[in-house]
Amino acid sequence: MKFRNLALMTTGFAALAGAAMAQQAELNLWTIDDPGEYHYVMADEFMALHPEIKINVRTVQFKDMVNDLARGVASGDAPDITYIDNPEVALFASRGLLLDLTPHIEASDIVDPADILPGPLASVTYDGKIYGLPRGANTLALYYNADMFRAAGLDPDAPPRTWDELYEAAKALTDRDAGVYGIAFSAVATEEGTFQFLPWVQMTGGDYDNINTEGAARALNLWKAFVDEGLASPDTLIRSQWDATGTFNAGSAAMAISGPWELPRMSSQAGFDYRAALLPVPEEGAERASALGEGDNVILANSDNPDEAFMFLEYLYQNMDRVWNEFGYLPATRVEVADPTYPEAFAVFEESMKYARNRGPHADWPRISQAIQAAFQSALTGQASAEDALATAQKRIDSILK
């Protein structure tokens, strides 16, 4: 009799477990991360806390995300949650493809837009509504080889502060016999190139919608001088930020313009005293600017489980203080990072974030970005003067904006 009761109890528990599993909400998440990285780690943690919610994580290549999402929406196979590069949020929001999170945020005890830094907040805001939450942020700074500075008679405790000082340092540090370039950066015809170029324009008072200016031409002519005079590699036009900074790590460039994502491999590959400094400004007292990088977590408008999806976004948001030490991003909110790794570099990038500006936002950002890329590429290859290239870009951008 006891065995029969035990069997009935076991059967009852199995039925209850089956019913619970049947009621389990299932979310699909697309990310640019690989297994073991941010979204995978956070999804596992969240599911351990919320067994009633299952998250299926899929890796999509960064360069394919926009097109894959467009195809997924068209075919009805879009995820519930996805990572989007920050300038792409307006593109998707303007087409009604993203869930307006404003009501969820207003009801949340966790998310407070006032705590989100201005640049990251602008990246998820479109037409007065909030369509995502930043998963973190990054920006640009100037890395430099302090050992090479000393060898060239430069003070490693006084890195270049202005464009003129940067140019003179690049000349002093270039050693053609040793195969060392003074500076490395990326002018590739992709979003990475726009990411690197736009802060130089913004420091002079221009922006993506006002790029045909004397200041922008001065910035582009400086880039051209770096390339034409052999202070930067000719490959600058085709190399990604990752590849360009790789030459710095290898000792083939004395300075590099890049972001905090480089620090883990820099610490293992760069066998020299490397340091970071704020991007130089046009002249002392000029306005600072830096690029806003990283992406945002958004929920697709057609998600069957928007409440559960927002719960996951809340979990990511409330763990923002972990992103620097564990995943290599800067916090996108006003949180304290306890005992930060790479403390000197963290201080520089944290300061730089104060000046980081979003690309756009604009619903047709990819087309605007392509016009900017065409401008710096045509000038750097000698197909047009900086002034003519920027004038052409401005005409293309004006036609898009109007």
Image: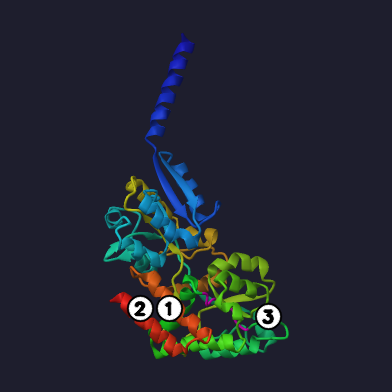
Q: Nearer the viewer, residue 4 or 94?
A: 94
Quarter of the image where one finds residue 133: bottom left
Proximity of marks 3 and 1: CB atoms separated by less than 8 Å: no
Residue 397 numbered tag:
2
The answer to the question of whether label 1 and label 2 lie on touching residues, with beta carbons closer than 8 A, is yes
Residue 193 picture location, percent across and down: 49, 75
In the rendered image of this protein, does residue 198 appear above or below residue 78? below
The mark that comes first in sequence, 3 or 1, is 3
Horizontal side, residue 275 vs residue 191: left or right:
right
Q: CA distance from mark 1 to mark 2?
A: 9 Å
Give the residue at mark 1: 372
Vertical arrangement, residue 134 with respect to residue 240, above or below: above
- Quick check: 147 above or below 362? below
Residue 134, picture quadrant: bottom left
Q: Residue at x 46, y 75 (%)?
A: 194
Secondary structure beneath dot 1 equals helix
Q: Among all residues in the image, which is located at the extreme right? A: 177
The residue under label 3 is which amino acid type?
Answer: Asp
In what element is the residue under mark 3? helix
